[in-house]
Amino acid sequence: MAYLDVAPAAPNGRTVVLLHGKNFCAATWQSAIGALSGAGYRVIAPDQVGFCKSSKPAAYQFSLGQLAANTHALLQELGIERASLVGHSMGGMLATRYALQYPASTAHLVLVNPIGLEDWQASGVPWRSVDAWLARELGTDAASIRKYQQEVYYGGTWKPEYDRWVDMLAGMYAGPGRQAVAWNQALTSDMVFNQPVVHELPRLKVPTTLFIGQRDRTAIGKDLASPALARQLGDYPSLGRQAAAAIPGARLVEFGDLGHSPQVEDPQRFNAALLDALAAGRD
């Protein structure tokens, strides 16, 4: 596992772990890393196995439990016994699984537009084989990434500063490791589709804050759903409130004008809200 380990300017004795989404890398947290380290937090931002700068195995049984175990092993190796976890998108699913597996090691759980807040298969989204996911991934390029993110992540809007993250993702599909990238992305898509965390939210026993951009419409497999079902999926205003009601003692922060990636769309506002949430959850 590749990871970033950023020392704080003036240590406050606390650590924050940033967990990226499926279409993201540790580097996507750049602005949050600066804000957190500036506020005294040690920051750990891993690239999960199968992503970005980490290894991309040809044979690996991807599961949220395994990725959580990998993350926990990394923190143990770094001498970190307890940390706050901030997970975005797929990273929110992973952070939830981590908090369920390692509650004593989780000081605070922050979920940023996490996916897995609905059970797509149970809702009627057709199942798709790993080979079908692979064929879809092999068609990925900068244009398709930009189109998807504009429609689903950013409510039809686009800013030039988003392009660097499109280029980052597209570059992995354009290089000599394209097949390995696509294969690992297919395996993780299968993992995400088949391992929703929504049914286990009431079992969370750690302080939890949800950050929900209200313009998000992300839903795995929506392209296979009927038009009527597709319109119902990825309703983040409803999903966020349902999740907050299901998680004992959860706090909900809504960003009415933001979408799937508040930390990218409005870093200054997101960072301020994140620092407030972490300070409020100090124990």
Image: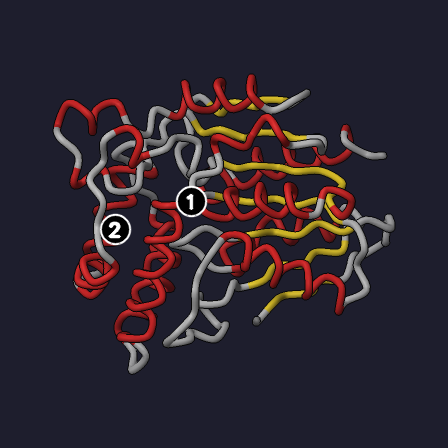
Q: Residues within 10 Å of mark 2 (few under 14, many from 20)?
A: some
Task: Report the residue that reaches farthest toward the left.
Answer: 227
Q: Which residue is mark 2?
A: 146
Question: Pointer 1 and pointer 2: residues touching (CB < 8 Å)?
Answer: no
Q: Is residue 103 left or right of residue 33?
A: right
Q: Does 278 sit above or below residue 4?
A: above
Residue 98 in sight in this render: yes
Q: Does 4 sit above or below residue 223?
A: below
Q: Residue at x 45, y 29 (%)?
A: 213
Residue 141 in sight in this render: no
Q: Which mark is residue 195?
A: 1
| Quarter occupied by residue 106 | top right
Q: Secondary structure at mark 1?
A: loop
Q: Residue at x 76, y 63 (%)?
A: 76
Q: Position of residue 276 (x, y in %)?
A: 71, 31
Q: Does 115 sit above or below residue 14?
A: above
| Quarter occupied by residue 239 | top left
Q: Is residue 212 left or right of residue 78?
A: left
Q: Secondary structure at mark 2?
A: helix
Q: Earlier in the sequence, mark 1 or mark 2?
A: 2
Q: Position of residue 119 (x, y in %)?
A: 36, 33
